[in-house]
Image (cartoon, helix red, strand yellow):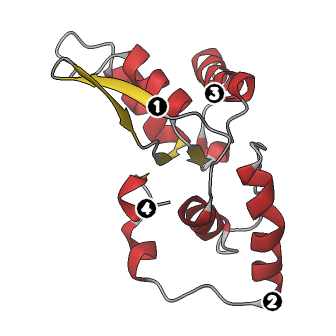
Amino acid sequence: MNSKNLRGFPPIYQSAPPPTGKEWLAKFHENLPRIESGAILIFCGERGTGKTRMAYELAKECRFAKLPPMRQTVAGHEMTVDRKAYYTTAMMLFIRLRASYRNDSPESELEIMRELSDASLVVIDELQERGETEFENQKITAVIDARYQRGFP
């Protein structure tokens, strides 16, 4: 995937040296075909074990051959556009969704949900930091279900 199609990932990874470590690289090579096939993965572990870096590297290297091209209308012309991989924390996703309810919001809830549903890959980090409210549970379920129904990772 072209790095310009990686949205929201921590900038520190853009200039980081290549990942190393036999176990880490083994997990990467184990998970790459899973992501490319449309699997939904959950990375759990202690802070600092490389979960976010793994997600970044997978997003960067994935080839999403099974995803159909995305069509958009821009200035009255329909065109094919690249799908993007998105990274967000759970908290920022919920803040963004709640902000979309303001009358002066530049984006709607539908636009946010469509952006996440149409992406080639979505990484939602820090799920343990959420409040587990009904609102949050419904939104996370909606994103995961929309992607699952389409076979998207």
Which three-letter amino acid code belongs to the residue tagged 2? Lys
Query: Is residue 74 or residue 135 the one in the foreground?
Result: 74
| Residue ranking furthest to the top | 103
Mark 4: secondary structure: loop
Q: Quadrant of residue 56?
A: bottom right
Residue 48 visible in the picture: yes
Q: Which residue is mark 1?
A: 70
Q: Is residue 1 above or below residue 141?
A: below
Mark 3: secondary structure: helix
> Is the residue under label 1 in contact with that under label 2 (CB below 8 Å)?
no
Query: Is residue 127 or residue 9 the one in the foreground?
Result: 9
Disc 1: CA contacts within 10 A as few (<14), some (14-19) or many (>=20): few
Disc 4: CA contacts within 10 A as few (<14), some (14-19) or many (>=20): few
Front: mark 2 or 1: 1
Q: CA distance from mark 2 to mark 1?
A: 37 Å
Q: Which residue is mark 4?
A: 2
Q: Using residue 30 as the reference point, say whether residue 151 is left or right of it.
A: left
Disc 3: CA contacts within 10 A as few (<14), some (14-19) or many (>=20): some
Where is residue 133? Give x, y as percent.
63, 21
Q: Which residue is mark 2?
A: 22
First in residue order: circle 4 vs circle 2: 4
Front: mark 4 or 2: 4
Mark 1: secondary structure: strand
Q: Which residue is mark 3?
A: 140
> Is the residue under label 1 in contact with that under label 3 (CB below 8 Å)?
no
Mark 2: secondary structure: helix
